[in-house]
Amino acid sequence: MAKRETVFVCGECGYESAKWMGQCVCGAWNSFTEERIRPADSAPSRLSGNNPRSAVAALSRKPVPLRDVTSGAADRIDTGIGELNRVLGGGLTKGTLTLIAGEPGIGKSTLILQAALHMAARGLTCLYVSGEESAEQIRMRADRLAASIPEGVLMLNETDVDAVCENVLSLRPDFLVIDSIQTMYTGELSSAAGGVSQIRACADVFMRIGKEYGIPVFIVAHVTKAGELAGPKVIEHLVDCVLAFSGERERDFRLLTASKNRFGTTSEVGAFDMREDGLAEITDLSGILLDSGGFGGGADDGGARKAEGTIVTGVYEGTRPLLMELQALTAHAGSGFPRRTALGVDGARLAMLLAVLEKKAGLYLGDSDVYVNIVGGLRPEGTAIDLACALAVWSSAKSVPIPYGTLAVGEIGLSGEIRSVRHTDRIAAEAAGLGFKTLILPAKNAEKTKPPKGLALVPVKSIQDAIAALMV
Ligand SMILES: [Zn+2]
């Protein structure tokens, strides 16, 4: 029987199968790609020859006293970009592998190059490995980003992992960038660059070399919303941080979020404005997120009312309060199952809130489609947005507009009670600063929150209380 020469690999989980399958064991559909497997006898031994990777592999490890181990937290490297530091948990940690994923053209390379320029300006050495763009193209970008280019940024146009390793070993840079992982290949596998096996093998090499020499490594990976470039998913378990850089290409607003971070929280959000001369940090994120609605605005328009189904809510993400606009729309369901579409809000959470609204507020939506959306593409964690979500749905279903300058925070329990959330004092201060008039909040929180100037606190104990507060 002839030996198999190819294998089918799932782009979601890395599962290998001898034959093509429509659905993988992990549940993904159409996720298999065919890859060649190398004949076993031609495989170079990892410990033979002058292969720099074998040098990495062959380094012996000895036990060290735990007492002498440093946590690494002390020597964080400042990337020079506050919002990037924030999402990383206070800067770069030595020897960590970070995956930054996003759609092609969204600005991943710009962000990382900007960080490299900042670090090099402080005397650090950054090796920027580009498998896609030429050194000239990157130079042109760098010219837009910085007035003068520090000598510490070194360019390498290379796609062969072994050659990259050789350079890393001789240079020992303070920061290594791989742009992008999809262009890298190792000669140990005969499959094409960008395939799941290649991505996995290359990321493994970069992880080991980074850990061995204490070099923080940034891996750029292209992903698409439709998921046709699903490969990077298989290395998420391997890396220390998974960052997502997102935004719409037509708009200049960009968000940096972490879905995994071994050295910090995943609740921090970084925000940027994409400009001709690079990414500018947005520190007043709430103001930007509310821009479209002009909710706070500061101007008193004599009690004019906003559209139905739109309310502002606040969360405390990471280390700062964030205000955002939440919209709901209910519409008569045409036929069959009513739709439930939640963007930025957890679908199961929305289903629970609809059940509470039905049971406690008499709002039956069994024959209605319900859409909920958080403006700006944020996906806040936690339950502080529950109350705003329920009130927005109620407002849309009942065609009752929410009074101008109102925001709501609070968790909703199954019996319709409003439970307290964290840091309402900080949210209140942020809201007052942006010109909001009324904050609907859990009664428990209201007891401990000093109302800032210009902002009225409306404490509520139940969903019925909250609805009554809107009716006045
Ligand atoms: Zn799978």
Image: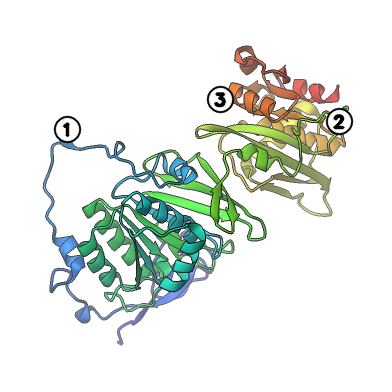
Badge 1 crowding class, 10 Å Cα cut-off, few under 14, some 14 to 19, many 20 or more, is few
Task: Say which residue label 3 marks.
Answer: 422
* Residue highlighted by disc 2: 301
- Secondary structure state at the residue bearing disc 1: helix
| In the image, residue 137 above or below residue 121 | below
Residue ranking furthest to the front: 148
Q: Is residue 413 visible?
A: no
Asked if residue 135 lies left or right of residue 417, the reply is left
Q: Is residue 333 visible?
A: yes
Instruction: Give the CA separation, mark 1 to mark 2.
Output: 63 Å
- Please, is residue 38 above or below residue 434 in the view? below
Quadrant of the rendered structure where residue 433 is? top right
Q: Residue at x 37, y 41 (%)?
A: 263
x and y percent of residue 110 in the render?
A: 49, 59
At mark 3, the secondary structure is: loop
**Residue tagged 1:** 67
Q: Is residue 467 above or below residue 292?
A: above
Local packing at callout 3 (Cα closer than 10 Å; few below 14, some 14-19, many 20+) is: some
**Ligand 1 closer than 8 Å to label 2 CB:** no
**Marks 3/2: CA–CA distance:** 31 Å
